[in-house]
Every structure is written in C-alpha cells, then in structure tokens.
Image: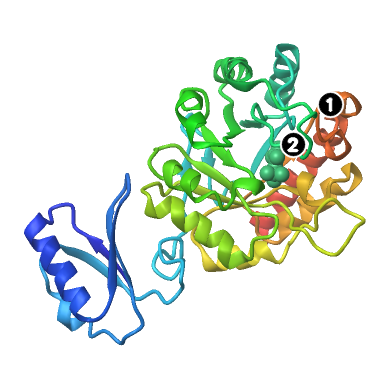
Amino acid sequence: MLIQIKDTCNPNQFEKIVEQVKKSGYKTTSVKTFNCHYLVCVGSKEIDIRSIGNLAGIKDIHIVDDSNILVSRQWRVKDTVIDLGDDVVISRDNFTIAAGPCAIENEEQVIKTVNFLNEQNVKIMRGGIFKPRSSPYSFRGLGIEGLQIFSKHCRANGIKVVSEVMQVSQIESMYPYVDIFQVGTRNAQNFNLLDELGKIDKPVLLKRGMSSTLNEFLASAEYIFSSGNEKIILCERGIRSFEKEFRNTLDLNAIPYLKDKSHLPVFCDPSHGVGIREYVEPMALASQMAGADGVLLEIHETPERAASDGQQTLNYYEANNAFKKLRMMEEMKRRM
Ligand code: PEP
Ligand code: MN
C-alpha cells in the first residue's frame, strides 16, 4: 500500500497515520522525494481502508500489490515524464535518441560528435569518462577532465550530457557537468550508489544488471526512488545467457513488461545488447516497436579506431541511417 501525504500534514498528524497503519500489521517507510511525501506500507494482511481513510494529512491511498511499490504503475497510471530543460523531454510521445561514443577520448572527438549530433537534431550525447573495463589494462576513461570538455561543448550547443558514475565519491565532482547520471550494468545492484543517487535532483539512467531478473531491476529503481529521486530511466542493455554468438542477449521481452509494470520511461541500449555493429540498427528498431521510449546508441566517426567497444559502434553514415529509420517508424507509430 502507498499513502501520499499532503504537503500541509503536520508531524502530529503524520505520527497518527503511521500509528494506525502499524496497528494493521504493516511496516512503514517514510519517503520524501523532490516531488512528494509518501508512506510506503509493506504487509500482507487485509487492511480496512476506512480505518485510515479519514485521517488528517492524507492526500491519497493506493493499494499496490507489486513488491516494488513506488515504481509500480498500479498507483501512477500515467507515464513519468522527465524534463531536462531546453525543450528536451523524455516521454512516451517523444521517442528519444541518445548517442555518442562509448568513451570520451579527446576534445576533437567531442567537437566532431557534437557537430554530428547537431546536424542530426539529437539532443542527448552519451560518453563514458569513468569506464568499467573487464581488464585493468584497457582504456579506463579520461575522468573529470574529460567530462569538463564533454560538458563544455554540449552546453554550448544545447545538448544534454549522460555519463556513467561508478562510485559514490564521483557523484559530487560529476554533478555540475552531467544532466543524466548513468548507472552501468555492473553497478545496477550497488545499493549504496543507488541510495546516494536518490538524494540528488538529476535524472538517473539505470542499466539492467547483466544477471538481474526484471523484478531485481525494478528493485534497483525502487532504491533510487525510495531515497528521494523520482527521475529514473530504465535501460534494457542485454543479459548474460547461454548464447555465445553475442556479447549479451538483448531481452526485448523486458520492454513491454517494464512499460506495463512501471510508470518509468524505458530505454534500450542495443549497442551493448548485441555487441555487433550490423545488428544494432535492427534491434534499435525492434525495441522501438516493442514500446521503448528511447535508445542509447554508441557512435564514433571511426569505430575501428575507438578506444573501446568499436565492434558495436555505428559510424556516422550508419548512425544517420538508423536515426532516419527510427524517426520514420516514430511517425508511423503516431499514425497507428
Ligand atoms: C556503457 O554504456 O558504456 C556501458 C559500459 O554500458 P553497460 O554498463 O551496459 O555495459
Ligand atoms: Mn561501451
């Protein structure tokens, strides 16, 4: 059960609500986000809503039987819309393309990518500056200095920045330069990191853990929400399976499921999901048809020279084709 508390609720009134809910055998957690005050009530007993319904300070009561309560669509029927400012809005009505290199490599690369995205009217650029690499000897990113360059050119061109944060201590230094914090698959269950990202007022793009079930994925999002941040984008990026032909197996089932279960926007990252350049465009289109609100794509002027993930990165010609098709499909979906 989820209780929305009125802004005008005073501590005495709140205490009475908590007391009454606890009497019914429920465990309560008070959650204050940048948007609203909630009382999350977990328990299995039948509750007579009339016993709490007319207590002062309650705005609304929702019966939610999903285990991930705050991110559930059972109480928030409408999709969450994330407004990044400057007319960049993430919503169902407005298919989002976010693209950029796997890793920020140098200033020239940033300028070229920003120019390309500008020409293509793409408003969100991705790029890692802290890179989680399987080998410690691989390129591990330019760090904050790289992010400053990345952000400078994006800001000058009205492009929003999404970049991965790998640990709690990086949040503060990244904060002035990013518009969306990305949580990578390897950190999808780093609960301390999720808690801390719940305390900030910038959106979080949460990748699915490569071995997370969908329920665990939603539980990771629930961590962020219950720590105070409602601006979460779920991103399917493939899971580990027995299949060896691909880096990961993109779980397209996840997209309609997540859209159904949760009010949060859902993106798809087919670059990491398949890991092979030739299959990225078809899987991006498939995810769009499955109901994704946006895609995250790795692009590079010369993928064969990229510092990381070149094999799954589209060159500008391929990216241009993919963007065109995604937009055509979007137009078609609107008319359907
Ligand atoms: C990335 O987007 O560059 C990345 C490392 O993704 P993932 O965490 O999904 O592997
Ligand atoms: Mn990558």
Q: Residue 214 location in percent, x, y?
A: 61, 65
Which comes before the other along the chain, label 1 or label 2? 2
The numbered mark at residue 190 is none
Identify which amino acid the numbered label 2 is placed on.
Arg
Q: Which is more toward the observer, 146 or 252? A: 146
**Gap between marks 1 and 2 measured at Cα:** 14 Å
- The kind of secondary structure element at disc 2 is loop
Residue at left offset 69%, top offset 25%: 141
Q: Give the color scheme: rainbow, by chain, secondary structure or one colour.
A: rainbow
Label 1: how many Cα within 10 Å (few below 14, some 14–19, many 20+): some
Q: Circle 2: is it few (<14), some (14-19), or many (20+) Cα within 10 Å?
A: few
Quadrant of res 259: bottom right
**x, y percent for residue 193:** 49, 43
Quarter of the image where ligand 2 sits: top right
* Label annotation for residue 306: 1
Q: Is residue 72 above or below residue 10?
A: below
Q: Position of residue 158 (x, y in %)?
A: 56, 23
- The front one of 191 and 285 is 191
- In-image side of 309 versus 85 (left or right): right
Looking at the picture, how far across and down is residue 238, in whole percent? 74, 55
Looking at the image, residue 77 lies above or below residue 49: above
Residue corresponding to mark 2: 133
